[in-house]
Each structure stands twice: as structure tokens, then as C-alpha cells.
Amino acid sequence: MTHPLISYLKNFWQGPAVVVQVSDKKDQLGQGIPTTTIVVRNNRVLNRIMRNLSLGFGEAYMNGDIKIDGNLMDILKGFYKTSIGMEDTLPSRIRALTKVIPERISADIAKRNARHHYDLGNDFYRLWLDPQMVYSCAYYVRENDSLERAQQQKLELLCRKARLRKGQRLLDIGCGWGGLLFHAAEQYGAQATGITPAKEQAAYIREQAQKRGLEDRVHVIEGDWRQLSGEYDRIISVGMFEHVGKRQYPQFFRKWDSLLKEDGLSLLHTIGRMKASPVTNPWVQKYIFPGGFLPSLGEITVSAAQSGLVATDVENLWRHYAQTLHAWSRNFEKVQDHVERMYDRRFVRMWQLYLQGSEAGFRYGDLQLWQIVLTKGKRPEWPLNREVEVKSIDKAL
């Protein structure tokens, strides 16, 4: 007898044709000739998935209770395309996203959440990121740009959109391994300060600043954004806002506004979603980014506006993040044996699912990548079009 979950999915499957095999029974989802098979140990695995689709499938894949013969992306593509079609018809027990209401995130909780992900070790991230260890969406001028070049182009894009000038004070909120700090200091002569709660990242930045002779221009604070003070000509935050938590948005933008000079410019670069939702992915919450929350564009701009910040320029780079994640996945596949020796097979499968699942979310789901230039009030001197600042990035690099 076909499991109820399989029967239900048969009616809605929108992705590539796949086969689900439970013991000796095989069922096909979708039309066409399948090239991928989901091998499931038994109905108990499907029961867990039925109770919580994201968490159940993620844990089953990590633990080896599900085996994919073929292409994992076929399954993920089908999952996202199907979940859109089933959004209003799925019984609550098998919804793709089970409700996880965001909680208030204190400074201590934020630090613990960040270290869960970013303190896995510099050696781990060095294996599959670009040489600058930039862990955020790259910017592809051409489809065939290398990851390294695309990340350099992203750093240049950020500085140009912020109209960074020599000698200006730049604050990078959530500075990662310092790629933007070093680019701003070396290419623009800026005084660059970053903040990160991750010990490994802060130690790496200090080491690199010393090696590059930039101790007087590159500084890092190991801590939480709430402790920041002073005034800055430019503020940029890349891939950090996802960790702030929705309930902290008013406080975050009040802090942002207090740090930015009256004539300053700032830029927020963050993953988001098309529609506002109080739910978040429970598997990602539990294993990848505890405390994470992805906002809609409206949730960002309304919260910013309440602090007097104007969204002067907005751009969606979702295609660029899909391509970035694809490059990371390919790099990760090349070193997965090394990663398994560092951790274990379960860890490898978790990261395979995270990287490819994120790519699928950008290609087929509702994930977006917003770059938002924020100013204090309207700026009449702002260029009439974006090309004034960014059209020659390719030539500059």
C-alpha cells in the first residue's frame, strides 16, 4: 500500500520526475523518465517526514535513513516547485515549513547563535570559500566569472554603491573574515572597522591586518552590534541582518541611525523572502542558523523608515546568490572526504543539504538577496542612475 505522503505528493509534484522506493515498492512522482531515486528505509521515516517535512527530511538525509541515487538537486527543485503549488492545500501536519515563531534574541543568545555556525573553524571554511574567505553572495559580471573574481566584484560593488572615499570611517556590521575591510582599506584608503561575535573570525582579521601592514587602518571588535558607539561616514552590513531577529529590528535600525553621520551613506545586504511570514525553516533553525529569520523587503524598509532611514536604492541579486551557492557546492564536493575526516559523514551530508538546498531556494523558491542603500532623508545629490557608480567594475578589476 502506498504511504499517504507519497499519495499526496503524486497529486502535486511539479519538479523533475523521481522515484520513491520504500523497501521493494516503487512510486513515481512527476511526469517523464526519472533519473533520480529516493531510497527510503521504511514507512517510519515517511511518518517523521509527514509530521514535519523540512525537519523530517533533513534529519533522515543526514542520518542516512534516506539515500539519493541520482541528483539531490532534482529532489530539492521538486520540493520547492511543489510546495508553492501545495501552499494553500497541504494539511498542517505536512506543511513544508512548520511554525517556529522568532524569539527575542539577547546579545548573549546572538553570540551563541553566531558561534554555532561561524566558529566551526577557519580551516573548514578555507577549504571551499574563495581565497579572501568571503562568505556571502558574490557578484557576477559575466556568467563564467570565477568565484574569486565574482567576490572581488561584490566587494567593489559595495564600496561603489556606498560611494566610499579616501579617509572616511567605514563600519562593517557582521564583518566575517574581513574581506570588505581589507578591500576598503587597500583600494579606497578607508579607516575600516568591523564587528563580529565569532572568535575565529576576529582572530583571523587581526592576523591578516598585521601581515598586510594595515593595523592602523583595519580594526575589528569581537562583540555584538548593540555595543557599538561613535559615528561613521559609511556603514555596510553584509549577510548579518538574517541573524538579528524580527523582534530586534526597531532596536537595530535605531542603533544604525545613531551610528551614521547626517550626511553619511549606508548599505544593507541581506537574504530575504518575497512574502512576510512568521515561520522559518525548522531544520535550518536547528542545525545551521539558530535564531535566523528571513524578512520580506517590506519588513526591512518599514522598520528602517521608522528610524528615519530612506531606502534610496534597492536591488535584488537572487540569481547571483544561486550561482555563488553552486560554486560553493562544487568546491565542497571536492573536499568532502577531507571534511569527513575533520568531522564525520553526518556533518558532510548536513552541509551538502544546506548548500544545495539554499541554491534551490534561490532558483526555485522565494529566497531573495536584497541590497538596500539607506540614507538619512532624501539625498538630491544621489546619481540619477545606478550605472554612474557601478558600470566600470569589470574594468576596474
Image (spheres, grey):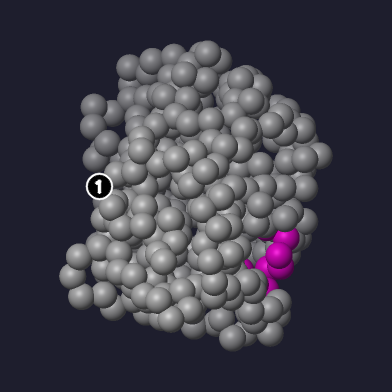
The residues colored magenta run 118-126
Q: Position of residue 138 (x, y in %)?
A: 41, 57
Regarding mark 1 in the picture, which secondary structure is present there? loop
Figure check: 201 above or below 123? above
The quarter of the picture where residue 91 lies is: top left
Does 98 sit above or below residue 258?
Answer: below
Q: Would residue 349 be visible to someone looking at this image?
A: no
Q: Return the residue nearer the eye: 19 or 110.
A: 19
Does the magenta-highlighted stretch encompass residue 34?
Answer: no
In the image, farthest residue toward the front: 1
- From the image, which quarter does the N terminus lie in? bottom left
Magenta segment includes 125 = yes
Instruction: In this rendered view, identify the residue nearer to me: 226 or 30.
Output: 30
Q: Position of residue 97 (x, y in %)?
A: 50, 44
Q: Amino acid at mark 1?
A: Lys
In the displayed structure, would residue 57 be above or below residue 157? below
The answer to whether residue 353 is left or right of residue 273 is right
Q: Please tell me which residue is depicted at 31% across the width and 58% down the height of the picture.
A: 10
Count the marks: how many?
1
Quarter of the image for residue 191 reads: top right
Indicate left or right for 382 with 356 as reference.
Answer: left
Q: Position of residue 51 (x, y in %)?
A: 56, 50
- Residue that protrudes farthest toward the right in the picture: 108
Front one among 73 and 335: 73
Label the magenta part by its dominant secondary structure: helix
Q: Residue at x 50, y 73 (%)?
A: 40
In terms of depth relative to the viewer, which is nearer, 80 or 386? Answer: 80
Residue at image location 48% in from the left, 27% down from the top: 300
Q: Position of residue 379 (x, y in %)?
A: 38, 18
Picture quarter with the C terminus: bottom left
Quickly name the residue at label 1: 391
Q: Write the residue at 40% across / 76% down.
A: 25
